[in-house]
Amino acid sequence: LISLMISVDQSMIWTWLNWKTLSLLIGAIVLLTIFPAIERGRSNALVPYDLMRNSSFMCACLVIACACQVFFIINLYLPEYFEKFRAYDPLQAGLPVAAFMLGFAMVSFTSGKLSEWLGAKPMVTGGLLIISATMVLLALLGPDIAWYVQSALLIIVGIGLGAIIPAVTTAAVAAAGL
């Protein structure tokens, strides 16, 4: 993974077709390809092979990997966007992120218990639908949306994500038999 990260990071300096970038990319592909074969035969594998064959666990991992992209984008790129393209100061740029985190905090503390009662599938499905509908609405409203409308919609996105992460984590732990 380090080879892959260095190649992507340095591609802007070296260019993508530079021999150094290509060598690091090829090395990353080769190492990532042989890693499962090496780990499969080991008794103390870094990633237990039987766990990776558990479809419920892998599905939970995939949902977390996709849902966490929303978390990452809102926390990292949204403030950058506000500062660079809307000329917000850092406090103004951080307030919509705080609204998102407020929605996340409102739900995430009870989501695990609620998923035990309702089941993980309704929580995850509902959370993904909430996030998808709200993100589409944000896109349709465009970049010049009023800050208070955007903050309210980000609270709703936070509620959707707060419903997903604890429920999926609980489901993954249950699927792993831990």
Image: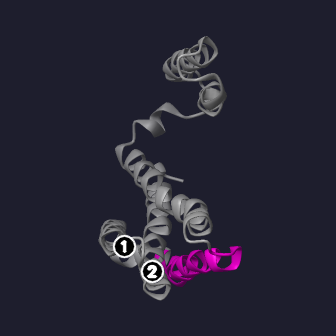
Tell me which residue sits at (49%, 19%) in the image.
33
Image-based side of 99 in relation to 153, left or right: right
- Residue 145 appears in the rendering: yes
Q: Which residues are magenta?
A: 88-111
Q: Nearer the viewer, residue 118 or 88?
A: 88
Tag 1: residue type? Leu
Q: Residue at x 58, y 23 (%)?
A: 15
Residue under label 2, please give it.
150
Report helix, strand or loop for mark 1: helix
Q: Residue 74 placed where, x, y %?
A: 53, 65
What type of secondary structure mainly makes up the magenta span? helix
What amino acid does circle 2 point to? Gln
Name the residue nearer the viewer: 165 or 6.
Answer: 6
Is the residue 69 above or below the residue 104 in the image?
above
Residue at disc 2, secondary structure: helix
Residue 44 in sight here: no
Q: Where residue 39 sits in the image (x, y, percent)? A: 56, 23
Look at 49% across and 31% down and name the residue there: 49
Indicate which disc, 2 or 1, sits on the residue closer to the N terminus: 1
Q: Is residue 69 above or below residue 149?
A: above
Residue on which disc 1 sits: 138
Using the image, tell me which numbered label, if any, was put on residue 47: none
